Image: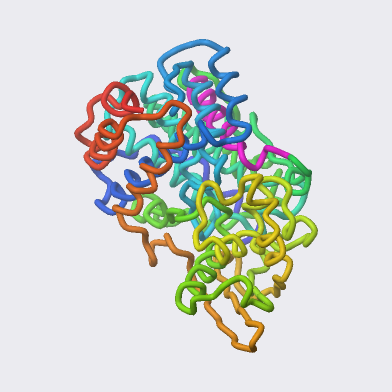
Amino acid sequence: MTAREEKSVRVSQHLAVFAAGIRSEDLPDDVVRAVKRSILDQVGVIAAASGLGVDCKAFVETAREAGGSGATLIGCRAETSPAMAALANGAMAHALDFEDTHDATLIHPSASSVPAALAVGERLSAGGSELIAAVCAGSEVACRIGASFVGSPQDGHFFLLPLVNAFGAAAAAGRMLGLDAEQMEHAFGLAMSQVVGSAAVLTEPGSSFREIRDGFNAKAGVLAAQLASRGVRSFGSPLEAEHGYYAMFQGGRFDPTAFEGLGDRFEVANVSYKPWPACRGTHVFIEAALDLRQRHSLQASDIDSIVVDVSPFFTSLCEPESIRKKPKTATEAKFSIPFALAVALIDGRVDLTSFDAEKRSEEAILALAGRVRHRSNDAPQNQSTRGGLTLETKDGRQFHAEYEEPLGHPRRPIDDDRLREKFRLCVAQAVCPTDDTAVELFIERTAALKAVTDIGSELIALL
């Protein structure tokens, strides 16, 4: 399709009509179930980050100082305005890299749609059905835009993946506010105008942006929807316009087939839930390490060499070796295949403590990470999480494991019991702990979310 033909496709309008008109009663059962699972998972991860997120305290304190009420800072027993709650909760949503992922695009759709929908919905005393519709709208918009990228989203000067969630947050907040399609389209433009993602954060030592990025997206989406509801206009066709998103960041190119079946086929039903708090690109290697360790009773002292087959997109998790084999920060460790699999092989687990300062200085882990070599496989962009691991022992034995999809993918799902246990473990890390009875009630009410008439008093207040 030529650039002119692409620009004739009214992508922005198509998404706006979808987001403004979505109703939970019209959604298929599997979509509703997926959205409820994502809400439970994301809220738990936010609560954990309130206690464990290194830079989250600054966002929480800033939100509290701003004043306001009507929207809860999850895990903190405090209120602020919807926009500032979206900022703080959004920052916590991705801080631990433990929330859901759309593996085909590597978008984290819930990280902005859930904070935005909760912040606005709580202020409005919205019910559970409205929350389902809003989160579905936001997450679906983000996934579809992510799927429309031509080439790698990490090419050039911009870090494009985070930008997508600003549109998702606008859709979620806009659906909660009851925007019509025209207002929704302007909300997209207003949200886009507030955010930018520089590729500098991918290489800048000590940058916090990768962890707290969705705070900016969620806040931008809420403000954009609020302004659009009051008649503020941005510009038409903010995605495909001559000076719109695709022109700015993709050279005017996009894949219009990514928007086919919108409203009939839902990408939110294809999100994955993370069993380990690390970059999704490390997960097949963590699983392979745990599997081989258990099946063959391997000890770190047995291992002579380790070779990983990694997709071209995720070779960055092995390079540069000076960082990936000796990470200095938790984020560097979570984005390191050598470090993550070394932890798995030595400890037999990967959890919320696996990337802290003590682990990053453990000599046995660093020594094993130092023996990892990598080579690139032929996985295409939409299969970038594919990978394999080969171990060779000092006595010459060789063991291999590989996976097409990581654990948690819809074709290799995590069941409800495991997801609920993850929620319990996460909430236990909140800066303001919640008693077990309230935790179980939150789980029950999320499972029966359509019966909730006020998400603030009946759901969020429990945490």
Percent of width and height locating residue 263 = 36, 49
Q: Which of 325 and 186 is in front in this view?
A: 325
Percent of width and height locating residue 21 = 35, 37
Q: Nearer the viewer, residue 368 or 325?
A: 368
Give the answer, above or below, for where 105 lies relative to 116.
Answer: below
Report the magenta residues as a range: 207-227
Task: Please give the name of the residue rendered at 66% of the width and 45% of the height, measured from the top-left corner.
Answer: 357
> Which image quarter: residue 440?
top left
Q: Which of 209 and 288 is in front in this view?
A: 288
* Quadrant containing the C terminus in the rendered view: top left
> Which image quarter: residue 164?
top right
Task: Please give the name of the residue rendered at 59% of the width and 86% of the height, measured from the top-left corner.
Answer: 398
* Quadrant containing the N terminus in the rendered view: bottom right
Percent of width and height locating residue 270 = 40, 57
Residue 233, magenta (yes or no)? no
Q: Is residue 318 left or right of residue 180?
A: right
State the predominant SS element of the stretch in magenta. Answer: helix
Task: Please give the name of the residue rendered at 52% of the width and 20% of the height, measured from the top-left corner.
Answer: 227
Q: Which residue lies furthest to the bottom in this view?
A: 396
Res. 94 visible in picture: yes
Q: Which residue lies furthest to the top in this view?
A: 67
Q: Is residue 248 left or right of residue 389?
A: right
